[in-house]
C-alpha cells in the first residue's frame, strides 16, 4: 500500500504500470440527511499503462470505507468509477476512504468527508381542544292526573337537571333528576299547595348545569279548585285549611269532599303570556328577557 497522494510505479519489462492517486474522490452532495444517499466517484483506477499512456491492463477494483462499512465497485475500462452509498443515521462528519486495487499493487485516494446533518423534528401538532357541544333541553309536554303533574322533558346530554315550579314570583317547588345520557324524562310534580291569588297558573323552568334556563312554560294554567283540593287532601281529616283556603264543602269536609275535583285530569296548558311566575324569577336574577310561550335556551351558546 502506498500513502495517499503518492505515485505507484512498477517496472515490468520496461513498461510503467502506474496510477495517479493525487486527486481526491468527488462526493455529491457533501451534506446529506441521515439515511440519505450520496455518491463518490473518481478516475485513475486502471492497470499498467504503456509509455504512451494507454492502458495495457485491466481496470482495478475500488473499495470504499465509511463508518466501519466496506463497499466495493469495479472501475470502468477507462479507470473511472462511481458508487452511491447510504449515509449513516447518526448526525456528524464522516471520513470516506477509497482505495484502488490493480493486479500489481494497491493505492489509496486522499480521504474525503461527508456531513450527515442533524434534522430537527417538527414540533408535535397537538389536537385542537375538544369543543363541547352546547347542551339543549326543552319541555315537550305537560299533563295532569289528579294532583300529579307530569312535565315531560327532553335533553341532549347526560347530567343533572331540574324543573323549578314558580307561582306569583315564588319558587314553590323543585323536581330534580340525573340523566345518564340524552333523552326524555317525565318529571313529576305533586300539587300540595293552594292556588295563590296573583296571576293564574304556575310556571315551569327547566335547568341543567348552567345558570341560564334551557326552557320554560309560563303560565301553565289549571283550575284553582284543583290546587285547593290537592292541598286539602294533605290535611288530616276534619282539619280546616289555614287562611280559609278552599271553599264550600271542600273546605269543610277535607279530602273526602274533593274526590270529584281530584278525579278530573287534563293537559290544561298555557293560555297567555301574562303569567308573572317565571318573569319574577328572571327579573330578580338580573336577566333581561322577554318571555315567550315556549322560549328555548341553550347552555354555552
Image (tube, rainbow, N blue to C red):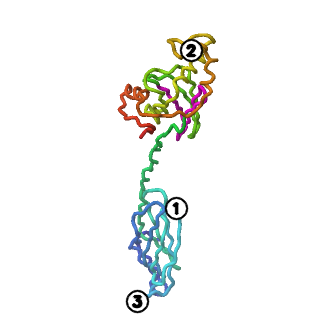
Asked if labels 2 and 1 touch by Cβ distance under 8 angstroms, the answer is no
Residue for badge 2: 251
Where 32 falls versus 56 (above or below)? above
Which of the two residues, 135 or 253, is positioned nearer the viewer here? 253
Marks 3, 1: nearer the viewer:
1
Identify the disc placed on residue 52.
3
Can you give x and y, in whole percent of width and height, for residue 300 in the image?
43, 39
* C-alpha span from label 3 to label 1: 39 Å
Q: Which residues are magenta?
A: 143-166
Please say whether residue 144 is one of the residues in the magenta stretch: yes
Q: Nearer the viewer, mark 3 or mark 2?
A: 2
Sequence-wise first label, 1 or 2 = 1
Tell me which numbered mark, 3 or 1, is placed earlier along the sequence.
3
Residue 150 in the image: x percent, y percent?
A: 57, 32
Q: Which mark is residue 170?
A: none
Which element type, helix, strand or loop, lies under badge 2?
A: helix
x and y, in percent, of residue 31 in the image: 40, 63
Distance between the Cα atoms at labels 1 and 2? 108 Å
Q: Is residue 263 above or below residue 152?
A: above
Residue lying at 47% horizontally and 70% vertically, measured from the top left: 98
Amino acid at each position: 500500500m502506498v500513502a495517499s497522494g503518492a505515485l505507484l510505479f512498477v517496472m515490468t519489462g520496461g513498461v510503467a504500470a502506474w496510477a495517479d492517486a493525487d486527486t481526491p474522490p468527488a462526493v455529491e452532495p457533501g451534506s446529506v440527511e441521515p439515511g440519505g444517499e450520496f455518491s463518490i466517484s473518481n478516475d485513475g483506477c486502471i492497470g499498467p499503462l504503456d509509455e504512451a499512456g494507454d492502458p495495457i491492463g485491466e481496470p482495478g477494483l475500488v473499495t470504499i470505507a465509511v463508518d466501519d462499512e466496506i463497499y466495493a465497485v469495479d472501475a470502468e475500462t477507462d479507470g473511472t468509477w462511481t458508487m452511491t452509498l447510504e449515509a449513516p443515521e447518526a448526525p456528524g462528519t464522516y471520513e470516506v476512504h477509497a482505495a484502488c486495487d490493480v493486479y500489481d499493487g494497491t493505492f489509496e485516494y486522499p480521504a474525503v468527508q461527508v456531513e450527515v446533518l442533524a434534522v430537527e423534528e417538527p414540533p408535535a401538532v397537538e389536537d385542537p381542544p375538544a369543543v363541547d357541544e352546547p347542551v339543549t333541553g326543552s319541555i315537550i309536554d305537560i299533563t295532569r292526573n289528579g294532583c300529579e303533574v307530569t312535565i315531560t322533558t327532553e335533553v341532549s346530554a347526560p347530567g343533572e337537571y331540574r324543573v323549578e315550579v314558580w307561582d306569583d314570583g315564588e319558587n314553590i317547588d323543585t323536581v330534580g333528576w340525573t340523566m345518564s345520557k340524552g333523552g326524555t324524562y317525565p318529571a313529576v310534580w305533586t300539587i300540595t299547595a293552594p292556588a295563590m291569588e296573583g296571576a293564574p297558573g304556575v310556571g315551569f323552568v327547566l335547568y341543567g348545569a348552567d345558570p341560564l334556563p334551557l326552557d320554560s312554560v309560563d303560565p301553565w294554567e289549571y283550575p284553582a279548585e284543583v290546587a285547593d283540593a290537592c292541598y286539602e287532601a294533605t290535611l288530616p281529616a276534619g282539619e280546616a285549611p289555614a287562611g280559609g283556603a278552599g271553599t264550600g264543602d271542600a273546605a269543610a269536609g277535607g279530602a273526602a269532599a274533593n274526590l270529584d275535583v281530584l278525579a278530573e285530569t287534563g293537559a290544561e296548558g298555557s293560555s297567555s303570556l301574562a303569567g308573572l311566575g317565571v318573569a319574577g324569577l328572571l327579573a330578580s336574577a338580573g336577566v333581561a328577557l322577554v318571555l315567550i310561550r315556549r322560549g328555548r335556551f341553550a347552555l354555552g351558546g
